[in-house]
Image (spheres, rainbow, N blue to C red):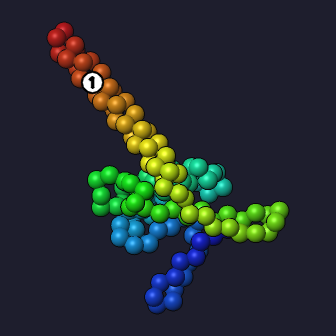
Amino acid sequence: NQLYQSDPSGNYGGWKATCVGHNSQTAISILKQEYKIGETQLNDALRLAIRVFSKTLDTTKLTPEKIEIAVLQHDDKTNQTTIRMLKDDELTTLIKQYEDEQSKLEADRQKQQQQQTTSTVEKDKK
């Protein structure tokens, strides 16, 4: 399965994950680093999409009003492909999960820095 992207000149390419628009190079860089072909499940991909939006949108806070996410899925049993737009409550949940993860990471970083500072001060006292 691939996404196909074409530009105005008619050139096209197949991708497993891509982005177009403002700050697309930053988004593509994040996708190249974090999207694992064959390993990324839908929930992981949705969290990654929120991360990409957070890092590339010119906004201080993500809200469901500022983003849209659609899920395109193929069911092998029925040979049907469906597209579903995520609802605002689903986007709110994903954004909150991302913000909670970021808060925890920041708290862990601050704790680690504090421990390093304390360790350095104790060494200087000796």
Residue shown at the point (46%, 49%) measured from the top left: 92
| Viewer-side residue, 9 vs 59 | 59
25 w.r.t. 122: above or below: below
Q: SS class of the residue under badge 1? A: helix
Q: Is residue 48 visible?
A: no
Specify the farthest residue to the bottom. 9
Looking at the rendered image, the quarter that the N terminus falls into is bottom right
| Viewer-side residue, 80 vs 123 | 80
Residue shown at the point (37%, 53%) measured from the top left: 62
Specify the farthest residue to the left. 125
Left or right: where 106 falls relative to 67: left
| Viewer-side residue, 32 vs 41 | 41
Looking at the rendered image, the quarter that the C terminus falls into is top left
Left or right: where 54 falls relative to 58: right
Q: Quadrant of residue 50?
A: bottom left
Left or right: where 93 falls relative to 26: right
Residue shown at the point (53%, 77%) measured from the top left: 5
- Count of labels in the image: 1
Residue shown at the point (71%, 69%) measured from the top left: 81
73 w.r.t. 11: above or below: above
Q: Quadrant of residue 111?
A: top left
Q: What amino acid is labelled 1 in the image? A: Gln
Q: Is residue 81 visible?
A: yes
Left or right: where 101 falls relative to 118: right
What residue is disc 1 on? Answer: 114
Tell me where residue 53 appears, x and y as whole percent.
Answer: 41, 58
Neighbourhood count class around disc 1 (C-alpha, 10 Å): few under 14, some 14–19, many 20 upward: few
Tell me where residue 83 appears, x and y as whole percent.
Answer: 63, 67
Tell me where residue 118 appears, x and y as whole percent.
Answer: 24, 18
